[in-house]
Amino acid sequence: MSRARRIGIALGAGVFVALVTLGAVGALRDDDRGPDVRRRHEEQWNLALVGVPEAWDVTRGEGAVIAVVDGGVDTRHPDFAGRVEATIDCVGAGGDPDRCGPGGDRDPDGHGTHVAAIALGAADNARAAAGVAPDAGLISVRALVAERCARRPCGSTGSTADVAAGVRWAVGAGADVVNLSVSASETVGDDDLIAAVDEAWDAGVVVVAAGPTRGVGAGLEAAPAITVTAVDADRQPAPYSSGTGGATWALAAPGGERRADTPDGCSGDDAVPAALPAPAGENDASGCLAGTSMAAPHVSGAAALLVALGLDAPAIVERLLDTAVDLGVAGPDGSFGAGLLDVAAAVSA
């Protein structure tokens, strides 16, 4: 029987059967939302590492749609201008997409905005850092509720049943790719969430999930989803990442090494630059975060580029795995999966 579980940044809530955490490993807790990051895409270590600028010579993802199931997205941000397909709120839906209601344009926590921007943030707009698929459309699915703590942001919590409802709603709304940057305090998966991912796959939708952080992941390793582990700029496993968790489909992607610790929220290539919700009265901000949460949307963006080229879900998964750069021991392994994402090779194969 399926058990509804809580999701959030902090472990040990105790009131519920289990807890799920966002994969940012506390990066949001340390972000001070300083001045905007003004990096051209050629200077973004994360995009260069996986060949994104070269892939843009082939496609930028026009026509593909990525759903980000998270704590909401600040859809007012210029990085998403003209490409927001839908917003929905599934908090309290309990697995039933028909119970989801109208969504908003705010993201109190910032995690969902950053994740969405890595996947599809606008390129060459003289604003925040670019995303992998800058012409793709966005569906924002709120399934988590921002926590409050002494220093914001500090993460979001919610029920896995609500995440499952969000996945189902996104599929029904026409998403081609669903990003799940969440992880669980238990190694076992939630039955309803796994069922929702199964349904998404049957509908031809690619689901991408953040890999385990410090031993725990989303519990989707046996489901038809691509699990994504994080590496640093030197292609080494990020210190917080726990590998692929034995997932059948797994890749490595840039997640950064550690939290951002400079006034502008970035420190060289230690973390991943992307949009963040703006302070009150403004509509444009960005910064750097690190985590498997940041690695996953690189793969979601790559999948969207392949959607734009006309590939179906099975072909997309096969292409991404087959073109990955083998790291570590020869062949697929528990540290890097099939290897490091290679977006340029994937769109050119």
Image (cartoon, rainbow, N blue to C red):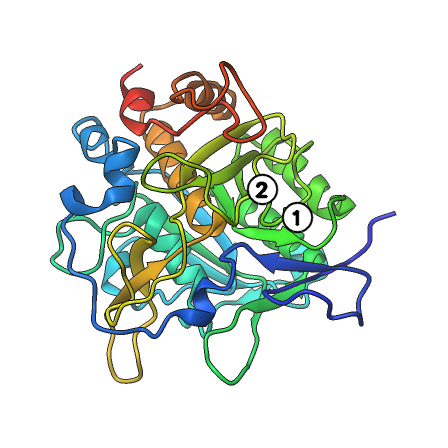
Q: Residue at image x 31%, y 43%?
A: 136
Q: Residue at point 44% right, 16% down? A: 322
Reply above or below: 19 against 109: above
Can you tell which quarter of the image residue 297 is in?
top left
Which is more toward the observer, 105 or 122?
Answer: 122
Q: Earlier in the sequence, mark 1 or mark 2?
A: 1
| Labels 1, 2: front one | 2
Q: Is residue 208 left or right of residue 261?
A: right
Where is residue 3 shown, x and y percent of the image? Answer: 82, 54
Vertical arrangement, residue 347 with respect to residue 42, above or below: above
Name the residue carrying label 2. 242
Reading the image, the residue beneath label 1 is: 216
280 is higher (above) or lower (below) than 244 = below
Q: What crowding class fits label 1: few (fewer than 14 Cα within 10 Å), some (14-19), or many (20 or more)?
A: many
Cα–Cα span, label 1 and label 2: 8 Å
From the viewer's side, name the closer residue of 162 and 25.
25
Horizontal arrangement in the rendering, residue 100 relative to residue 46 (left or right): right
Q: Quadrant of residue 11?
A: bottom right
Q: Amino acid at mark 1?
A: Val
Identify the secondary structure beneath mark 1: loop
Q: Is residue 139 left or right of residue 218?
A: left
The image shows residue 167 at horizontal and vertical percentages of: 59, 48
At which x and y percent is residue 231? 42, 40
Report the amino acid beneath label 2.
Ser
Asked which secondary structure carries label 2, the reply is loop
Q: Name the image quarter holding the C terminus.
A: top left
Q: Are marks 1 and 2 in contact (CB under 8 Å)?
A: yes
